[in-house]
Image (cartoon, grey):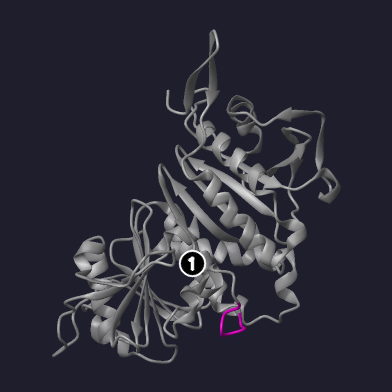
Amino acid sequence: MGGIAVSWRGSHFVVTQSTYPGAVALSERVHAHLQSLAPEAAPDARLLAEVISIAFWASLRREEGLTPKISLAFLTLAQAQHPLVFERPLPVTAAALTKLAPAVERPGIHLGVQRDRDAVLVWGALRELPPYCCVLEVLAPGQLVIKYSREADAKFVNLAVLQGDEVKIIDPCATARADCPDMVSSLLGFEARFTNGSAGVLIELAVSMRAHGHGGSLLVVPAGSDSWRESIAKPIAYGVDPPFRLLADLMEEDASERTRRRWREALHHAVEGVAGLTAIDGAAVISDAYEVLAFGVKIIRRAQAKPVDWVVLSEPVENAALRRVEPTLLGGTRHMSAAQFVQDQPDALALVASQDGRFTVFGWSLEERAVRAHRIESLLV
């Protein structure tokens, strides 16, 4: 099995678990980034490297036929609030993590990890994390994500995504371009240019679209304008009249209401409902005020408009250069039609989820004078 190293020492063989390729370099990068944000929350680079390697090999194991899903939080017991504490801390090994996984696989539950002398231990479990706490999640065989908790809310900012031997380090400088959508800026951990929470709702819609697994498209068009209809085939089978305003009404509530659990639960259900409409063949349409206008629509090229020949592809990870590509290379007809819609309707956004988990945001770039395709699945995992 991969991950096992056998060496000869004197008169006998020694069997050890090998290090995940690049774990040391990656852990140093993560440590340096967190050190710049909150020195007290940055885990030791050596500890990070050890746990990354162990978690990677744990992700390839199975327990009762299932692969483990685990979230490991790097903090001491003294830093935790309302934890569940083990009477005897457990050593962090692939076998131990696999055994524990079924008890902590639900969202929002983390295993607390810290170093005690030379040992790396799981001391218990917890739900509440302090700001900038580093978290390592095992999502699927060979797939891990490193993130940290934000100061203002319970959401996370991704730092790196590991898939097999491929490592993608998130590039926070991706927001430097003026045509970076607010939802991408928010995912990268920066404040969006607008303060009404709109970027956060688009992020939640994107996560929900990706989660339902059917693939789908969501068109976000200017409120009060009907120009989007010029790019939609007639008749519209699932038009909504009057516009459905549940999500819009929730977003118009006072900021004080948005901190309440009732509001968060209502928003979650509204987002799930809107995202579910994207599973229907065709695209769903909402206004930028979050009114549902239609779903299951077929996108067509606007009269006398030119076909989209290429888009500018970008991904907010290090060493990912801008490229001009044909829209069909991004994922087929769904991506092609979304790119055409944005070229014809430059004030709109198009969010496209693929069945394989890829996610692309199409927007018009004033700098490039072309459609910009932002690949952001590395920010959504």
Bounds of the magenta span? 191-196
User: Which residue is more in the foreground, 39 or 345?
Assistant: 39
In the image, farthest residue toward the top = 11
Tell me the residue that label 1 is attached to: 171
Point 42% across, 23% down: residue: 1
Point 71% across, 69% down: residue: 152
| Residue 193 in view of the camera | yes
State the count of labels. 1
Q: Quadrant of residue 255?
A: bottom right
Percent position (x, y) of residue 71?
Answer: 62, 44
Q: Amino acid at mark 1?
A: Asp
Whether residue 244 is in magenta: the answer is no
Percent position (x, y) of residue 221?
Answer: 39, 83
Report the side of 90 relative to 13 (left or right). right
Q: Quadrant of residue 89?
A: top right
User: Which residue is more in the foreground, 371 or 65?
Assistant: 371
- Disc 1 residue crowd, few under 14, some 14–19, many 20+, Cα 10 Å: some
User: Which residue is more in the foreground, 55 or 125?
Assistant: 55
Percent position (x, y) of residue 358?
Answer: 36, 57
User: Which residue is more in the foreground, 74 or 252?
Assistant: 74
